[in-house]
Amino acid sequence: MVNRFVLLEHTADIGVEAVSGNREGLAEQSGLALRRLLFGEAAAEPRLGPVPIAAAGNGDEETLVNWLNELLFTMVDRGVVPARIEVSHFGDGRIAGTLHGEQFDPQKFRMLREIKAVTHHQTRVDHQADHWTSVVYLDL
Amino acid sequence: MKSDESIKIEQIDPCRWRIPRTGDMRTDGLVFASREMMEVLRHEQALQQVCNVATLPGIVGPAMAMPDIHWGYGFPIGGVAAFDEHDGVVSPGGVGYDINCGVRLLRTNLEKAEVLPEIRNLADALYHNVPSGVGSHRKDLRLSVSEEKRVLRQGAGWAVANGFGTLNDLDHIEESGCIDNADPELLSDRALERGRNQLGTLGSGNHFLEIDFVEKVHNPQAADALGLFAGQVVVSIHTGSRGLGYQVCDDSLRTMLSAARKYDIKLPDRQLCCAPLDSPEGRAYLSAMACAANFAFANRQIITAWVRESFEQILRKGPADLRMSVIYDVCHNIAKWETHEIDGRHRRLCVHRKGATRAFPPHHPETPDAYKTIGQPVLIPGDMGRYSYVLLGTETAFRETFGSTCHGAGRVLSRHAAKKKARGQDIFGELERQGIILRAAGRGTVAEEISDAYKDVRDVVEVVEQAGIGKIVARLRPMAVIKG
């Protein structure tokens, strides 16, 4: 199963659909989509120590949104540009992961857009026979 | 989610459409739109969102949408809904992340011809003096936590007390620039942190600062009362509560998701999570929301001061010559306590406006004294390549839409589609050939904000005027646009 994300059309904003063989992969792929939307393809190095990102929620959907908002805060307000995102656990109303990256440097990176938040609108986390899919919408 | 093609819609008149109550809806939907607009709406999800709002407890009157309606989160953009104080709810999704996103209009004593030779310098000065774009801030305005909390309690009044503007400005702002019952102690540390260095910043996306001129006066008497005349230079400011507001909304949504379970409120969309108005969660949200709204009022007030400074600096004129006074400042993402007459009885309601503007009539106690005889000014920005409008509130709006009207043009293209359409276009050059100087942090946002991404705002305000929920006073055309 290939882990991937695609960006979905929304009249004012944008959605993210992630596909993975497991739930953890959904959180990673959705996180990578945020990273792409914020910083584009500019490569980052894992210079900082691992930054733990954890969130809880009621059900997979709420938990995923909360985790992505934590990630968004770390990237935008703490200025950490991810080189990679690793999720060790997604289930039982909890996501735990780490972000490996470097501090935002305006000489190297550009923040391409503002993402106000990851919303709860039409959020889905589904398990099909051999893979998982999720959808979240972002408020830009 | 049900596709909008399957929603039953009845045309009432050329600009009103009823969505009859079905299923879990507690009331009808009422959409203001032309036939052409409705054809487009049937292919997106905004009408379903009107139906979803109609399911919320304690809703009074129909769930409404203004003609700039488009697909949002929870509520549609352009959505208006009122809730009873005793059995109604408050929903952060009915306000949005950018709490008190709004528009302010400043008049000047200047005519287009005398500003034109300096328009590039003015655009550069505004771009330099007013931080715009993602993560921007002024190094000379960083607040301590205690000072930030004073901003949240006092709103635009804090800015004026600290040298950003005059007391007269406050008389020309919705709620005089401060919503009561703001309690900063309810805000998370993260919300405070996100706001601390963002006061006085424009932000990104559809936020802007524009130098416009009055291209056409539709209603000379009202224009005169507002201090507007043909050819006059004015300035529009569109921004909100920045990261602080986004965080207040996000924090509140977490609380409201639990509250909806606690109070057994059935949600057709999690983003509509809510709590009874008369509950600890409902009261806490309104107090936190008031903080963010006050931050936004202060934000626009501080930007106003820097706009005035920029004009003085470039045109080498003093305040008395420029006479840059605030015409009005409106919120378009807010929930507010208001009294409205329902079936002959005055009722206290919590009116949610998400991408909608208050439009109170002449002689309403909350219409500013200066505009008592004409009605509350309503500021409707279009897109950066066309025009914006100044309207007035009406009795019809007060009776029919809880004193509400549209807030802008409304998007028709997704950001991706807009970027695709803009590919290969010299956006800066094309605007310049139309006489519009554009300054922006990057091409990306600008490509998403091209005129084609929006409805023609003229169509929107024409529906508003035809429906009687707003009265057109003047049309403004941009001369310079600052985008984040």
Image (spheres, coloured by chain):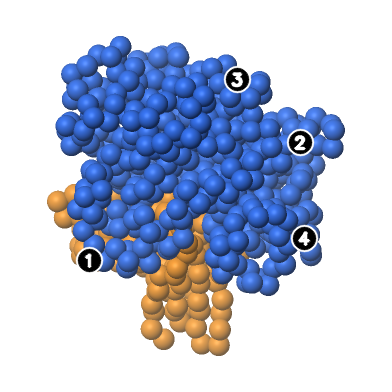
Chain colours: A orange, B blue
Do the dots labelled 1 and 3 sit on one chain? yes
Q: Which residue is mark 4?
A: B20
Do the dots labelled 3 and 2 sit on one chain? yes
Q: Which residue is mark 1?
A: B424
Residue B85: give its label: 2
Q: Earlier in the sequence, mark 3 or mark 2?
A: 2
Please report the residue visible at 48 percent of the width from the left and 19 percent of the height from the top: B170
Looking at the rendered structure, the secondary structure element under dot 4 is: loop
Residue B443: give its label: none
Tag in front: 3 or 2: 3
Report if the CB atoms under discs 3 and 2 are less than 8 Å apart.
no
Q: Amino acid at mark 3?
A: Lys
Q: Earlier in the sequence, mark 3 or mark 4?
A: 4
Q: Amino acid at mark 2?
A: Glu
The x and y percentages for residue A103 are 23, 52
B6 vs B426: above or below: below
In this image, B328 relative to B320: left or right?
right
**Hey, which quadrant is residue B60 in on the image?**
top right
Looking at the rendered structure, the secondary structure element under dot 2 is: loop
Query: Disc 4: which chain?
Result: B
Q: Earlier in the sequence, mark 1 or mark 4?
A: 4
